[in-house]
Image (tube, coloured by chain):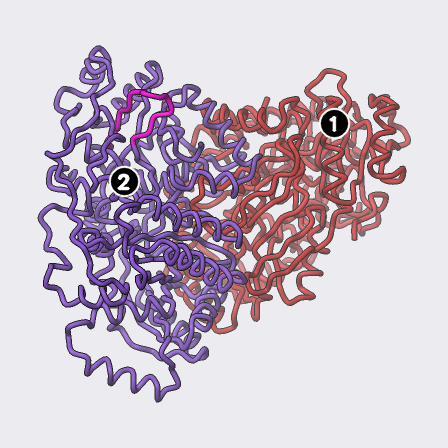
Chain colours: A red, B purple
Amino acid sequence: MTIDRQTLRWNGWGPVKQPNPLPADAPQWGWIEETLGMSRLPLTPAVPLPDIRLPHGRIAEATQEKLRAIVGDNQFRIDDYERAFHARGKSYHDLLYLRAGKLDMAPDAVIYPRGPEEVLAIVKLCAEEGIALIPYGGGSSVVGGVNAVSKTLGGAILTLDTTLMTRIIQIDKVSMTARIEAGIYGPALEEQLQAHGVTLGHYPQSFEYSTLGGWIAARGAGQQSNRYGKAEKWLVSAKLATPKGFWTTEATPASAAGPNLNQLVAGSEGTLGVICEATVKIHDLPERKDYRGYLFKNFAAGVEAARRINHAEIPVAMVRLSDAPETHFFQTFSSTGSGGLKARLQRAYLKMKGFDDAPCLMLVGHEGEKDTVIWAQEQTEGVCKRLGALALGTGPGKRWHHGRFNGPAIRDPMMDRGVGVDTLETSTRWSNIANLHEKVVAAISGAIDANMPEQNAHGIVMAHVSHSYPDGASLYFTFVFPRQLDREIVQWQAIKRAASDALLMNGGTISHHHGVGTDHVPWLAEEKGEIGMSLLKAAKREMDPKGVMNPGKLFA
Amino acid sequence: MTIDRQTLRWNGWGPVKQPNPLPADAPQWGWIEETLGMSRLPLTPAVPLPDIRLPHGRIAEATQEKLRAIVGDNQFRIDDYERAFHARGKSYHDLLYLRAGKLDMAPDAVIYPRGPEEVLAIVKLCAEEGIALIPYGGGSSVVGGVNAVSKTLGGAILTLDTTLMTRIIQIDKVSMTARIEAGIYGPALEEQLQAHGVTLGHYPQSFEYSTLGGWIAARGAGQQSNRYGKAEKWLVSAKLATPKGFWTTEATPASAAGPNLNQLVAGSEGTLGVICEATVKIHDLPERKDYRGYLFKNFAAGVEAARRINHAEIPVAMVRLSDAPETHFFQTFSSTGSGGLKARLQRAYLKMKGFDDAPCLMLVGHEGEKDTVIWAQEQTEGVCKRLGALALGTGPGKRWHHGRFNGPAIRDPMMDRGVGVDTLETSTRWSNIANLHEKVVAAISGAIDANMPEQNAHGIVMAHVSHSYPDGASLYFTFVFPRQLDREIVQWQAIKRAASDALLMNGGTISHHHGVGTDHVPWLAEEKGEIGMSLLKAAKREMDPKGVMNPGKLFA
């Protein structure tokens, strides 16, 4: 069920053998060069693994023997590929290090347990011997959540890869819950559930290369979270292997038996223990799906539509609103090279309809029983039209559906040409969306402008509302910029710091669904406050007094 | 804004001056006597306060001076009425003690702060001097949640009454949230919100005599929780006064910035600090409400309807399904003395329609925009009819609405006649509802039968599904029984133990919305497990190292 690590890129996204979405002769390159104001895009290939020297392993031979005794020789790996593959996650920042061949941060070994009992034995051994233990599912973290960090200087680091634990243990079609092992990848999970006519419905952009356990650990959100909920919402119960033993959380719906400890598991990011199994809420496969596009005259009108759709309790699966730069970017990116006549005609039509050059695209998805979808779609269209939107029909929905997991794969060829691509996301109350959007765009743009490799170079900053709630919504920012090749880490840090400070200063959270990892540690402390952090640390001390579980994540 | 304590019953429910719903000449008495198999119902009046001697206060004079300095003389009370009023909550078990004049458990003083700063000063003083501090809102706990317990033998106890803190601080009609002081009673809260066209929609049976802070502390549920959510769902952010200082939790929607600490506040039951303010989700006042009755041939068919309504995601406000004994009880109770002809005709009609003598009544409420309500009601009726239900129209909904807060007030006259009335509630997954219902009814009935004052006496045990979710539902049990006057505490303990053991042995939670308090402490430990409890205790130690905050609740 697992994906063979050798078939995946250790320093990029997805399979080694996949068509390059942006080959050297793609028509987009000229446009990117022009848009970024670069005289020419340099060639910046990644250093291949054979040219990289990894640090010596620090796990004592006797301990290695004990670990082999738990899982068998074949499931305990110390080869360079496994160590490099598990060194870091998939953030822009991680890729800078990996592509440069900087593998100082790499686990000393990787272990593949086949079930909770083996996980527990590994956790206990690491706690006894003071070895840092990094739980690793798909490894798709973009915040340093799986990075091989030890809190002890020169301490040994073991990465625990969960992807051999992939069983669906039980499906309860009366209660609509399923108990599933946490190392299962998205596609395998959905394939097996859908064979029973049910779905979890959790489709993050990382779906193909992320796992159930990771979704829970980081409080992830699928693209259809309006219908299926974020991880903390669909989580019914979890079983963790912790230094104190197995911890199984309560499974009764909406209990009042003290605080809900599932909510301490969601967002724990491996710092309390390894999530081995989870019981999750499932749904019947939707009888019908309906995804459509609406074009708004400006971002504010689209935000208002999203807000009204939520407050009217129309059962939507997804509401996704791009701001004007993002709408323009994707329109141009996909139409570049395909002839400009259609685009020119479209623009003329829009102008006639009172749209200026900065329209905003909203995609709304409905899923469920046929009658409900038909009814809900009519309600949604009514809200959008009353706010002056142009209904674009199902075409934009189909195009989005087709490419919805492709974002990260486009980053790799960009990075081969000196281009940086990063994203970050937040959420805030509805009354603060416009303000936060403006302030964060300004902060990112400002930091990009202040850190450019050439005088006329500049970046692109765009955003969309990706998830929405009764009290607010998330904002997802994407920024593309030419790298300062001699100081690319410093450049990234400057942008990240400016963006994160702007988030916290303007009522946003440091993350809506990526999590904290190592990268957001300073801002988490600011967001939760001293007392909040002291509570999290108290839980950590109680479960993991030696601090071996995923050190450096959540806490400084 | 607060309700004058002197106008309320210190040893019963509601105002001193309220019409007795069961006067001595009410036609129901004969029926109750007969139904309970009693030769006659004894007179068991409560001991009046002037006949009761309260224990000597244990707060040192110097400390009293410091407390008076914080709030002023008038807000610091040591008179018998205030101490008796705040001695316990409103459980059956509490009333047994209060009515018998057993006031060994009473706070030494009661303090009424007017805002968070005063609360913090009180909390800090209590932490310094080791005085047990009991947060008290409406005092409607039925699980010992506000009982004046000290963990130190002979330790001093101060009850902090929050009901002078009643301001609505801010209403954000764009984000649909309101920031409100926690001591506000239900009616005042709704009156003020509704003057702005909005509602929290939280209407527990205790609505008239419970407060915002209490709802959050105990993870309460309003009767329309399908639409408005339980407290932990509508809580956006809270401000607590703790021994470590003010603690304000994160307010961003669905953040992934570590575990959601609001979920540690919900269900904390005053053990971490005093909830001073909360930001909550609000809704526009529903344009339309539609409440209707459906009669099912048996409980299983009604449960299946409730399940399908949830899984089809029909937007309902309330689904409430009585089992056959409860349907029969309320039908008989309300029709007793009003002539039997109508009831006989109804029975004949039902028999003709294929209903036997054990039909089950379901009430379904829809609230929201007019079109949505019309559409949803049709969907609901379709589900019910496909399962063989008889649609009864809006009459049953109106009758329920009229008496929906009256339950606790009927208990007082029952207790004057040697009759015990108690309730308890749980939740479980859909696939376990039938089993849990059967096992808990059997456990309660068995314990009642084994503890009867007369040979032919017996009790009545009935239940309803009160709240429902995608993965399961709650069950609310009511039991009426003749008291063993010479051992009524022991009798109650036997019933409570049998019921609670049955809950935990059969996959139920110890509480769905009443909380843990003192009464459920042993079962909480069983439900959460050793590791779960150790995490809660770690948080407690961190926030309240001296253990002064509401001792004896949640933890042994």
The answer to which of B257 and A480 lies nearer the viewer is B257
Residue in the image at 25% along x and 71% along y: B332
Label 1 packing within 10 angstroms: few (<14), some (14-19), many (20+) = many
The answer to which of B68 and B45 lies nearer the viewer is B45
Residue B89 bears which disc, if any?
A: 2
Furthest-top residue in this view: B62
Q: Is residue B152 magenta?
A: yes
Kindly indicate whether the residues beneath marks 1 and 2 are on one polypeptide chain. no
Mark 2: which secondary structure?
loop
Q: Is residue A449 visible?
A: no
Q: Is residue B494 magenta?
A: no
Of circles 1 and 2, which is in front?
Answer: 2
The answer to which of A292 and B149 lies nearer the viewer is B149
Looking at the image, residue A163 lies above or below residue B149: below
Chain letter of disc 1?
A
Q: Amino acid at mark 2?
A: Gly
Residue in the image at 74% along x and 51% along y: A166
For disc 1, the marked residue is A126
| Rendered location of residue A8, percent (x, y) | 81, 44
Chain letter of disc 2?
B
Number of marks drawn: 2
Chain part drawn in magenta: B148-161
Residue A209 falls left or right of residue A472: right
Residue B18 falls left or right of residue A344: left
| Rendered location of residue B48, percent (x, y) | 12, 39
| Rendered location of residue A303, percent (x, y) | 42, 50
Looking at the image, residue A532 lies above or below residue B496: above
Q: Amino acid at mark 1?
A: Cys
Q: Is residue A340 visible?
A: yes
| Rendered location of residue A204, percent (x, y) | 62, 49
Mark 1: which secondary structure?
helix
Contact (Cβ within 8 Å) of mark 1 with mark 2: no
